[in-house]
Image: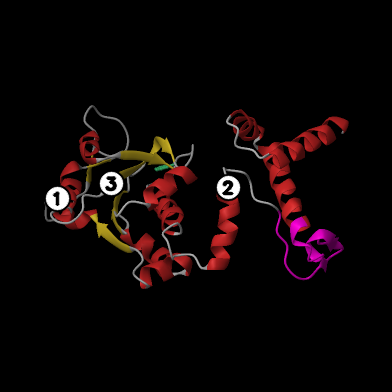
Amino acid sequence: MRIDVLTVLPGLFDCFLREGVIGRAVKSGKVNVNVVNIRDYALDKHRVVDDVPYGGGPGMVLKPEPIFRAYDELTKEGEKPLVILTEPWGEVFNQDMALELSKKGRLMIICGRYEGVDERVKSIVDREVSIGDYVLTGGELPAMVIMDAVIRLIPGVLGNRESLSADSFMDRGLLGYPNYTRPSEFRGMRVPDVLLSGHHRRIELWRKEQSLKRTLDRKPELIDKLMREGKLSKEEIEIIKKLKGQKNED
Ligand code: ADE
């Protein structure tokens, strides 16, 4: 996959693209991330990328020309990218969107600034994406969040051990079960006996129960939805009935 990132703060991406799983994916060529400084496409000698808003008001707005010039240059050849603009009031990013984007051959992420981007830029944008209902100073952190979630889904990016744990999170949106590692007792807190038992079927059942319990506690609407859509197994429905019974007794 190729990802072009258009930003006024390219330095912010250095560590992100060098370290950890993402750094490995870049080094191995599984993803080619091209960070482009919008300023390099400015028309004037001071390389100005923003200007005051027409109609007045506070803040500065990113000018259209440098962004269009960068877009034209980068899309002159090759596959046309799916273009994302980061926006606090865009469609809220989630795992389904990450999965969908991970299947594309090419993405372009335009990092907005919190004051805004000239509305005409949206004529080249396919999706306006927010990473949550809060306002950041710019689209660079959202671009990294989107890339992190997307790149880890590219086949071969995660090793076997990592991908196993990811699967449990992606199982119909159910929340993950609790995890423990050595030591088996720490400051008086013991790892549940079942995890030390070596009994695979019992461990699997315990994890399923814990995952359903967490989901029922924190996202009960998801359980109702899966139930309505017939996406729960008989065994899971039995576990949920039991958990609901226990809740009612409390
Ligand atoms: N720009 C500023 N805040 C943002 C957010 N929450 N998501 C995406 N882009 C943003």
When the figure is inspected, residue 182 is found, relative to residue 128, above or below; the finding is: below
Q: Which mark is residue 223?
A: none
- Picture colour scheme: secondary structure
Residue drawn at (78%, 70%) of the image = 183
- Which is closer to the viewer, label 2 or label 3? 2
Q: CA distance from mark 3 to mark 1?
A: 14 Å
**Res 192 visible:** no
Q: Nearer the viewer, residue 73 or 216?
A: 216
Q: What amino acid type should be assigned to the residue bearing mark 2?
A: Asp
- Which is closer to the viewer, label 1 or label 2? 2
Quadrant placement of the C terminus: top right
Asked if residue 194 is among those painted magenta in the image, a careful observer would answer: yes
* Ligand 1 image-quadrant field: top left
The quadrant in which residue 33 appears is bottom left
Residue 235: give x, y in percent of width and height. 72, 42
Quickly name the residue at label 3: 82
Residue 150: give x, y in percent of width and height. 42, 54
Q: What amino acid type should be assigned to the residue bearing mark 1?
A: Asp
Quickly name the residue at label 2: 171
Residue drawn at (64%, 30%) of the image = 224
Magenta-colored span: 178-201
| Tag 2 and tag 3, C-beta contact below 8 Å | no
Crowding around mark 1 (Cα neighbors within 10 Å: few <14, some 14 to 19, many 20+) is: few
- Which is closer to the viewer, label 3 or label 1? 3
* Most distant residue in the bottom direction: 27
Q: Secondary structure at mark 3?
A: strand
The quadrant in which residue 231 appears is top right
Quickly name the residue at label 1: 72
Quadrant placement of the N terminus: bottom left
